[in-house]
């Protein structure tokens, strides 16, 4: 963004916008979400959130946390070494 962009002020009438209730919102330019839409929809999780989806037993997590302040990197390193060792085993 340029400095010029930062100096622009919004021309939105925020008071009028905040005064509109849900029934007053015009959705005519948005297609309705049908059952077909949801049947074809795919859940996509951004990469930074994927790391939070792994379930780790509390005692295992506690052990890793006790090893290093960078316990997440340590867990990742252990998992990576495991994958690499499996790849080496399958290559032989």
Image (cartoon, grey):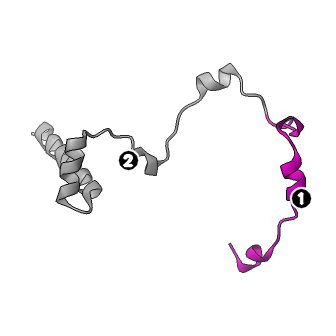
Image coordinates for residue 38, horizontal then vertical, percent: 62, 25
* Number of marks in the rendered image: 2
Q: Is residue 58 left or right of residue 16?
A: left
Q: Residues within 10 Å of mark 1 (few under 14, many from 20)?
A: few
Residue 10 inside the magenta-drawn segment? yes
- In the rendering, at what x and y percent does residue 33 appear? 72, 27
The N terminus: image quadrant: bottom right
Instruction: Identify the residue shown where x is 18% and y is 42%.
Output: 87
Work out whether 17 lies above or below 86: below
Q: Nearer the viewer, mark 2 or mark 1?
A: 1
The front one of 27 and 82 is: 27
Query: First in sequence: mark 2 or mark 1?
Result: 1
Q: Which residue is mark 2?
A: 51
Q: Residue at x 14, y 37 (%)?
A: 90
- What residue is shown with label 1? 13
Circle number at residue 48: none
Image quadrant assignment for residue 52: top left
């Amino acid at each position: 963004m340029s400095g010029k962009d930062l100096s622009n002020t919004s021309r939105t009438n925020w008071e009028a916008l905040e005064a509109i209730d849900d029934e007053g919102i015009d959705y005519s330019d948005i297609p309705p979400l049908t059952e077909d839409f949801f049947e074809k929809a795919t859940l996509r999780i951004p990469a930074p959130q994927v790391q939070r989806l792994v379930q780790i037993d509390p005692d295992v997590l506690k052990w890793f946390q006790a090893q290093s302040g960078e316990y997440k990197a340590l867990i990742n390193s252990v998992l990576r070494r495991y994958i690499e060792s499996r790849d080496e085993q399958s290559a032989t």
